[in-house]
Amino acid sequence: GENYAGESVAVAHIPVNVGGLTWALLTEIGEAEAFHSLEELKQNADAAGEKLVGWIAGVVLVALVLVVGTALFLARLLAQPLTAAVDVLDGVAKGDLSRQLEVDSGDEVGQMAYSLNAAVAGMREAIGQEQVDWSHLGEQRRQAVQRQAEADRLARRLASLGRGALPEPISEEVVPDLAEMKENLNALIGAMGQVTSTVECIGSGDLTVTIEPRSEDDALLHSMKSMVESL
């Protein structure tokens, strides 16, 4: 309500019985004065809320900075040895077997570096040099496999002669360092064929067969020739 001065007030009353008469005890207080404490409390609460929000935002920001900083640090910590390992592997791919990683920890990264160093050292020891041309090495390996296959084929022909069989002469091309062996083996096969043919002719009574020794050192065919001529 309003008081006599026209001010908004809050009024409270209570009945009072005095001498058999009922009176009313009134009290009033201006609304501005009555709600001043509530308004002040509300303002204090709003200020405290703003401070709390600011404090929480600050804590979140600091935590975010710490998390991002830690992540970047760990990423850098892991990236450095991995980058070094990639450099070593790139060098190996280009034929450089002299590179080594520094092993300064016993964790998984350190174990990786140790294993990579052991692998590179093993290749370096097996090849016997620190610089290698992988394409040339591959070609050497291919030639070695081919040489072994051709040597095995020559060995089988020689083994056939050893068992008394007369194999066909070798017509396939061979690597240069086996060419002389191929010629000698074919010459031996030819001589054995000539001896076999001569013996067959003699056995059938034909003594007109002609024997041509391969050289002055061909004791077998010289002896066969002398035997035929003396018959």
Image (cartoon, rainbow, N blue to C red):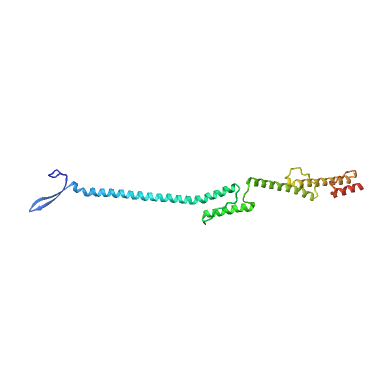
On the image, the x and y values in percent for residue 48 come to 29, 50
**Is residue 4 shown left or right of residue 121?**
left
> Which residue corresponds to the image point at 43% horizontal and 50% vertical from the top-left?
69
> Which residue corresponds to the image point at 89% horizontal and 48% vertical from the top-left?
226
Q: Nearer the viewer, residue 123 or 207?
A: 123
**Is residue 56 shown left or right of residue 177?**
left
**Is residue 204 shown left or right of residue 175?**
right
Name of the residue lying farthest toward the left: 19
Quadrant location of the N terminus in the rendered image: top left
On the image, the x and y values in percent for residue 30 come to 17, 47
Q: Nearer the viewer, residue 212 or 204?
A: 212
Q: Nearer the viewer, residue 181 or 211?
A: 181
On the image, the x and y values in percent for residue 161 come to 79, 49
On the image, the x and y values in percent for residue 177 come to 73, 47
> Which residue corresponds to the image point at 35% horizontal and 50% vertical from the top-left?
56
**Is residue 123 shown left or right of residue 21?**
right
